[in-house]
Amino acid sequence: MDQDLSYSYSSKPRPVQTNRSKARDGGVYVFDLNCLGLPCGDLDVSVWLNSKPTPPNIMHDPRIPRGSVFAPIEESDGLFNFDVEVMPLLNVLVNKTLAQALLEVKEEQEIRLLHCQNEALKSDKSDAQQEERALEDKAKEAQRRKELIKKKKAEDLQQDRVMREKLLAWQLARPLASQAINQATSTLYKKGVFYDPILRDLTLWMQRDIYEAADANIRLRYLSSQLLDESKIEAWIVGHLGGPVDIPVEGFLSLLQLTKTI
């Protein structure tokens, strides 16, 4: 019986030829009941089962006689063909086990690959987030600089406006202040509250060096020439003497002598 026994996990199921069509000897399945003390004709299974407690493992049932463990294994009696019936099953089991192991290895590789891809995606996502944060920081920095430039321009415009207002006010107030100062100075000069320091120094110098050192006649002549004129003298004479008087040519001293004689 030639048959291709190659079988893998990818192969389709195949029918397996067995020896079920052969005649089997059922005597091998009959236990020797005489050793149990029961007649074969009157076999009652319930009596046999209830005679003693059945051990949990029938392979260790002391009621069943067994040969020695050291007895040689006899050849098969033709119950089944190992090469035909067992080998295909073993091949299938081995192939299935290998396929399952290969599948598990592939799954582990896929999981490892997915894990690596996930790590790569996380790294790319982290890099993208870092780049996004860097772009946001750059945008914020540019916006801040723009705001600073705008604020500086506004401050410069404000300073220029204030400076122009100050210049305009200075141009308008300069002539007014000059006029007010001149008017106040002239008013103070007229009232005698304020005096010119140059004129005062000149007056003190003339009083100290000229008036005090000069002759009394010269001082009287100077005072008479400065304080009195002919019209004032005539008015004084008319007021006090009742008529005009000829003023002597000698000047104020002769006039004083004339007044003394009157």
Image (cartoon, rainbow, N blue to C red):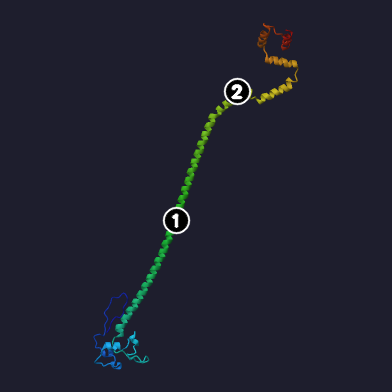
Q: Is residue 205 above or below residue 16?
A: above
Instruction: Indicate the position of residue 45 as horizontal and vertical percent values.
Output: 27, 88
On-image quarter of the N terminus: bottom left
77 is higher (above) or lower (below) than 132 = below
Q: Earlier in the sequence, mark 2 or mark 1?
A: 1
Label 2 vs label 1, nearer the camera: 2
Taking the image as shown, residue 153 lies to the left or right of residue 89, namely: right
Q: Label 1 belongs to which residue?
A: 131
**Name of the residue lying farthest toward the top:** 243
**In the drawing, does residue 101 fall left or right of residue 256?**
left
Q: What residue type is labelled 1?
A: Glu
Q: Residues within 10 Å of mark 2 (few under 14, many from 20)?
A: few
The quarter of the displayed image where residue 65 is located: bottom left
Residue 25 in view of the camera: no
Q: Which residue is drawn at 68% across and 15% down?
A: 227
Q: Can you say which quadrant of the picture contains the C terminus?
A: top right
Is 40 above or below relative to 244?
Answer: below
Q: Distance between the residues labelled 2 and 1?
A: 81 Å
Q: How crowded is mark 1: few (under 14 residues within 10 Å), some or many (20 or more)?
A: few
- Residue at point 62% right, 22% down? 191
x and y percent of residue 211 in the render?
73, 20
Residue at 31% across, 84% down: 83
Tell me the residue that label 2 is attached to: 187
Say whether residue 168 is left or right of residue 65: right
Q: In which quarter of the image is residue 195?
A: top right
